[in-house]
Image: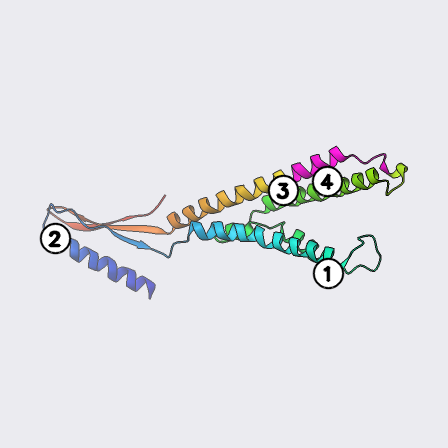
């Protein structure tokens, strides 16, 4: 059925071209499939990061409200569970924006996994160093703990994650433009004194 419609449209365009007097500028007929939106790709990328961050924030708030002593054995696990789920969801992060055009950035997800691992390690290192400063742990356990190392790992992890996310947002917008260009065709009736025809222009 689709071929029949295309043939009918081409035939109509050819007839219109023959009816025009020679020398007139022929019309250009463009056939486009529904285009995708760069804005939608950007929104999907941002939402893919914002939702996990919101879940982590809710988990931290819940844990603080329900567990006054983080070292107690009978603490409610719901808050920490939400934090863990939010952290896992941050690994794909901005992937929905690129999935909008059927791209899956496996390499970038691997980079984010390493970045989050460094961020968590840095945060744990900072926490241990703070406890050592307050005298909450034995001095022997503090020999390999460094506050500076913790901040370094935390900073590198966060910077890598943010850079990976920005790259995905830019790539998602570029892939939308490529998607739209690859699905656009232009049909141009051609005129001369002797004949009329059609030129079909496809994107390269």
> In terms of sequence position, does the residue under pointer 1 or pointer 4 come before the other?
1
Q: CA distance from mark 4 to mark 2?
A: 74 Å
On screen, residue 36 versus residue 76, left or right, reads left
The prevailing secondary structure element of the residues shown in magenta is helix
The circle drawn on residue 111 is: 3
Q: Nearer the viewer, residue 184 or 147?
A: 147
Circle 4 is placed at which residue position? 122
Quarter of the figure that contains the C terminus? top left
Q: Nearer the viewer, residue 170 or 72?
A: 72
Circle 1 is placed at which residue position? 78
Foreground label between 1 and 3: 1
Inspect the magenta stretch and tell me whether residue 145 lies in it: yes
Q: CA distance from mark 1 to mark 2?
A: 74 Å
The image shows residue 121 at horizontal and vertical percentages of 74, 42
Quarter of the figure that contains the N terminus? bottom left
Q: Quadrant of residue 86?
A: bottom right
The image shows residue 165 at horizontal and vertical percentages of 56, 44
Q: Residues within 10 Å of mark 1 (few under 14, many from 20)?
A: some
Question: Which segment is the magenta one?
Answer: 142-157
């Amino acid at each position: 059925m689709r071929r029949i419609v295309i043939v009918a449209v081409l035939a109509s365009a050819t007839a219109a071209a023959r009816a025009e007097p020679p020398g007139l500028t022929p019309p250009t007929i463009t056939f486009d499939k529904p285009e995708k939106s760069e804005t939608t790709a950007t929104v999907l990328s941002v939402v893919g990061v914002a939702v996990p961050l919101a879940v982590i924030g809710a988990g931290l708030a819940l844990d603080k409200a329900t567990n006054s002593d983080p070292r107690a054995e009978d603490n409610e696990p719901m808050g920490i569970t939400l934090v863990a789920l939010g952290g896992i969801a941050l690994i794909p992060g901005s992937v929905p924006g690129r999935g909008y055009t059927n791209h899956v950035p496996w390499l970038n997800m691997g980079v984010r996994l390493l970045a989050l691992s460094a961020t968590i390690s840095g945060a744990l290192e900072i926490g241990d160093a703070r406890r050592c400063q307050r005298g909450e742990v034995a001095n022997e356990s503090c020999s390999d703990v460094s506050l500076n190392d913790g901040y370094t790992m935390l900073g590198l992890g966060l910077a890598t994650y943010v850079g990976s996310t920005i790259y995905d947002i830019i790539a998602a917008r570029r892939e939308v433009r490529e998607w739209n260009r690859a699905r656009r065709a232009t049909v141009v009736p051609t005129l001369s004194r002797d004949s009329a025809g059609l030129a079909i222009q496809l994107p390269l």
